[in-house]
């Protein structure tokens, strides 16, 4: 199993439309077998200032703590929301196995931030 886990943080303003498109994309991503969603945290501050949360992926245990919720909510203005999604890069499993079978060893793994990755795209 790959140990490479990355996260995506997103911010939403008061005009955001939550119509299920994000959940659909996470499901599509998992069905491809390339990535596995490990955990998710959705936090929204209502227009009256109340905090609404939706931690975890239905049917799976969550790793999100109340401290995580508090941290995510701390900077939200009324009507705004935040999303954090943690994903495992399962596509690495087959590649790591092929490297091992060829007599090699993976010596380093990592992710480049977008500004560094741009250099490879030209």
Image (cartoon, rainbow, N blue to C red):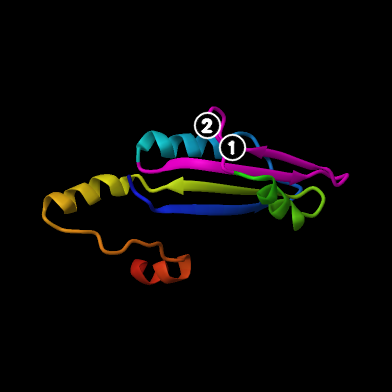
* Local SS, label 2: loop
* Residue depicted at 56% across the width and 40% down the height: 22
Give percent across and percent down for residue 84. Answer: 59, 49
Residue found 46% across the figure and 54% down from its top: 6
Label 2: how many Cα within 10 Å (few below 14, some 14–19, many 20+): few
Circle count: 2
97 displayed left or right of 64 = left
Residue range highlighted in magenta:
34-63
- Please say if the residues under marks 2 and 1 sit with CB atoms less than 8 Å apart: yes
Percent position of residue 120, x then y: 34, 68
Q: Quadrant of residue 43?
A: top right
Q: Is residue 60 magenta?
A: yes
Against 10, is 63 above or below? Answer: above
Residue 41 lies in magenta, yes or no? yes
Number of the label disc, if any, that sits on residue 60: 2
Residue on which disc 1 sits: 56
């Amino acid at each position: 199993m790959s140990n490479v886990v990355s996260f995506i943080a997103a911010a939403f303003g008061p005009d955001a439309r939550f119509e299920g498109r994000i959940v659909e994309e996470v499901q599509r991503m998992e069905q491809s077998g390339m990535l596995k969603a490990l955990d998710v945290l959705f936090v929204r501050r209502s227009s009256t200032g109340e905090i609404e949360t939706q931690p975890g992926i239905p049917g799976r245990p969550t790793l999100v703590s109340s401290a995580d919720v508090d941290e995510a909510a701390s900077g939200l203005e009324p009507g705004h929301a935040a999303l954090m999604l943690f994903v495992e890069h399962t596509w690495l499993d087959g590649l790591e196995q092929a490297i091992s079978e060829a007599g090699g060893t993976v010596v380093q793994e990592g992710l480049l931030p977008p500004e560094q990755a741009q250099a490879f795209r030209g």
